[in-house]
Amino acid sequence: MKATLVIPTYNRAERLRSLLHCLAEQRGEALARVVVGDDGSSDHTVEVVQSFRDRLPIVHAWQEDRGFRAGQARNLGIERAIGDVVIFADDDVLVGPHFVDAHLRAHAARRGQLCVVLGPRHRMLAFEREVPGPEDFEQAERDDRIGDLEGRSVEEHEAPWIFVYSCNFSVTLGGPELRFDDGFSGWGLEDTELGYRLHHAGYRILEEPDAQVLHVD
């Protein structure tokens, strides 16, 4: 299986650089494309993307700055996605070297099914190395809604779509409803709304504990 990884960004060139470095260190050959969905940045985001062209199959997709339109920026990535799965990660997180493989393993175990795979988010106040390892995630504080399930699986929850949050999830390519609603602007809820539509279109919403991201404050 192959994946496209989509990163929405806006004027966070150095945070983006850190994430791209993590992606360049991924194990295996499963990363078919990285799409940076640029929501109209005016800093040196383009130069950062260009600096990774010899290390990643990277595409820069830009839209005019007309306010906070992260959902539409992610749609730029969906439109350019190739492979079997599209993974979404925000520009302010770091990932370990097996991040892409963890998402793809979860999908491969359910090949032939439409799936949404959720990964946990952890938070640290400071992080000195370039790429986090297992020990870093163990030490960090978990900070996501999935951690509140109290022993139940996402599928058992009466409203599993509420756990679809944009900083770390993946979706099977080729199924219906995979597009963020263009009507959303400003922060929040576009990911929950997408999860709602995907759930009602027949996608299974699952958690993969090894598909972790680290947010550094």
Image (cartoon, grey):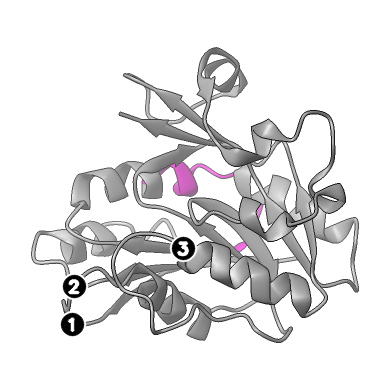
The kind of residue tagged 1 is: Glu
Residue 211 image position (x, y, % from top left) = 65, 42
Q: Residue at x 84, y 37 (%)?
A: 152
Q: Which image quadrant: the C terminus?
A: top left
Name the foreground residue: 127 vs 165.
165
- Taking the view exactly as shown, the residue that stands out farthest to the left is 42
Give the residue pinned by disc 3. Answer: 189
Mark 2 to mark 1: distance in Å?
9 Å
Residue 58 image position (x, y, % from top left) = 41, 67
Residue 50 placement, left or right of 166 = left
Give the structural element (helix, strand or loop) at label 2.
loop
Can I make out residue 84 in this image?
Answer: no
Residue 8 placement, left or right of 163 = left
The kind of residue tagged 2 is: Gly
Mark 2 to mark 3: distance in Å?
16 Å
The kind of residue tagged 3 is: Leu
- Disc 2 residue crowd, few under 14, some 14–19, many 20+, Cα 10 Å: few
> Where residue 64 is drawn, which disc sits there?
1
The magenta stretch is: 21-31
Give the residue pinned by disc 2. Answer: 67
Q: Residue at x 47, y 81 (%)?
A: 181
